[in-house]
């Protein structure tokens, strides 16, 4: 490893550590200003999770990881797909509706339902892609509006196909057959609950993301277009086609977000299906710097904070919503830290180049003096 690569690696490690320290300090100041027990809060947040909680952390991270990967595909293209939450809703509803009909047996029903979710999520994302390519509409505006439309459309369709649960106000699609329900894996000793079987899906998605974006011509074109559209056009890349493809791919991946929940936990799509996962993915993708391994650690951190926050009200007398403040501060601190380390790396590289040029000039002058 060269000195430059070693320096970049050390800076990459230092940035999140510095950000976490800053987040810890700022959150403590907020708690002190509000008169909340700082010590009790951090004892609760940093306490060792029980086996059941560890399983919940891993399960939460699986879903958040899929969400962040969907966002990261757009980020690599310099597209801000804020509509992952809407695409996730549409994909999950479509998959639940299909799987609940039990037209296919067992595993085949699961596989086809996953494809249905990807097609539905990709279709919803294609609307924003078309508006950007053909009408020049910002994907930020269109995807935010499509989130609201997706919520309304899915709610309306859900009322049309809903099956009401006896003794409850909750409604949902038909429950998927038992042959298509995934029991999960008991990987954590002492835990009564199980890790989602579709952990395997998250691993496959992460590997494909790494390979396609980092090792293929398509991935190179996508990253090149995101870095410089002008340079991409000069090298023969069809930018509009790349925008359409990237946005649809992001939407298709967004359709996968709800699959671990559908087949491993809820077994139907209804009013109690988890919301807000698409927006969490934006923050996690930024924390992980759009790298599949970095996103995995960021998803685990995010899920850890969500899980540990459940005990804040009981143990520390603080509302669990405090975790949103912590997550927000961590996000801002990480973004600032990454930008700071990036600028520092550029400055150090400029100084290194300047020293080498000065040394070369001195060597040339010495040679000329010797010849004279």
Image: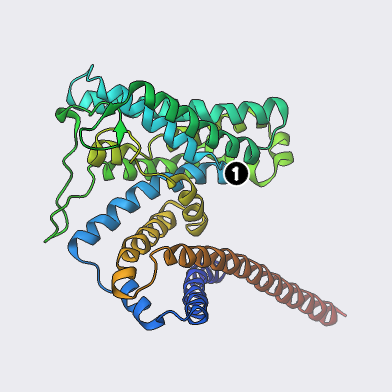
Residue extending farthest right = 372
> Is 208 left, or right, of 233 in this rendering?
left
> Is 94 left, or right, of 341 in this rendering?
left
Disc 1 on helix, strand or loop?
loop
Mark 1 highlights which residue?
Answer: 80
Write the residue at 50% across / 25% down.
Answer: 123
Write the residue at 27% across / 41% down.
Answer: 198
Q: Position of residue 118 (x, y in %)?
A: 41, 29
> In the rendered view, would you say 89 is above or below 345?
above
Q: Nearer the viewer, residue 40 or 168?
A: 168
How many discs mark residues in the rendered view? 1
Write the residue at 37% across / 21% down.
Answer: 160
Q: Nearer the viewer, residue 15 or 91?
A: 91
Write the residue at 17% across / 25% down.
Answer: 106
Image quarter for residue 126? top right
Q: Nearer the viewer, residue 21 or 100?
A: 100
Colour basis: rainbow
Q: Position of residue 193 (x, y in %)?
A: 16, 52
> In the rendered view, would you say 111 is above or below 323?
above
Examine the rendering and report whether any part of residue 210 can be seen: no
Q: Residues within 10 Å of mark 1 (few under 14, many from 20)?
A: many
Q: Position of residue 153 (x, y in %)?
A: 48, 27
Q: Quadrant of the C terminus?
A: bottom right
Q: Position of residue 169 (x, y in %)?
A: 29, 37
> In the rendered view, would you say 146 is above or below 327?
above
Image quarter for residue 171? top left
Residue extending farthest top = 103
Examine the rendering and report whether any part of residue 319 can be seen: yes
């Amino acid at each position: 490893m060269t000195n430059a690569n070693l320096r970049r690696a050390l800076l990459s490690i230092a940035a999140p550590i510095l950000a976490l320290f800053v987040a810890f300090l700022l959150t403590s100041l907020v708690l002190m200003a509000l008169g909340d027990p700082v010590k009790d809060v951090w004892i609760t947040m940093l306490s060792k999770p029980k086996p059941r909680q560890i399983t919940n952390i891993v399960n939460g991270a699986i879903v958040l990881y899929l969400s962040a990967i969907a966002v990261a595909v757009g980020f690599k293209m310099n597209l801000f797909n804020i509509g992952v939450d809407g695409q996730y809703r549409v994909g999950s509803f479509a998959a639940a509706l299909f799987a609940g009909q039990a037209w296919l047996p067992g595993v085949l029903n699961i596989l086809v339902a996953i494809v249905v979710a990807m097609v539905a999520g990709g279709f919803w994302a294609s609307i924003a892609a078309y508006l950007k390519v053909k009408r020049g509409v910002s994907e930020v505006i269109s995807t935010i509006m499509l989130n609201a439309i997706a919520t309304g459309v899915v709610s309306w369709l859900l009322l049309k196909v809903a099956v009401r649960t006896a003794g409850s106000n909750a409604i949902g699609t038909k429950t998927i057959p038992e042959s298509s329900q995934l029991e999960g894996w008991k990987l954590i000793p002492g835990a009564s609950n199980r890790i989602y079987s579709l952990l395997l899906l998250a691993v496959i998605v992460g590997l494909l993301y790494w390979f396609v974006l980092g090792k293929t011509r398509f991935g190179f074109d996508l990253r090149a277009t995101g870095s410089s559209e002008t340079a991409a056009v000069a090298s023969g890349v069809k930018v509009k086609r790349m925008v359409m493809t990237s946005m649809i791919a992001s939407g298709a991946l967004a359709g996968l977000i709800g699959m671990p929940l559908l087949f491993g936990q809820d077994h139907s799509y209804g009013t109690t299906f988890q919301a807000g996962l698409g927006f969490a993915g934006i923050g996690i993708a930024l924390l992980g710097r759009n790298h599949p391994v970095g996103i995995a650690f960021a998803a685990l951190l995010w899920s850890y904070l969500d899980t540990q926050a459940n005990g804040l009200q009981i143990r520390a007398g603080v509302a669990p919503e405090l975790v949103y403040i912590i997550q927000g501060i961590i996000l801002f601190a990480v973004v600032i830290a990454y930008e700071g380390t990036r600028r520092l790396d550029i400055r150090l590289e400029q100084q290194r180049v300047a020293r080498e040029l000065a040394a070369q000039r001195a060597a040339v002058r010495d040679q000329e003096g010797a010849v004279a």
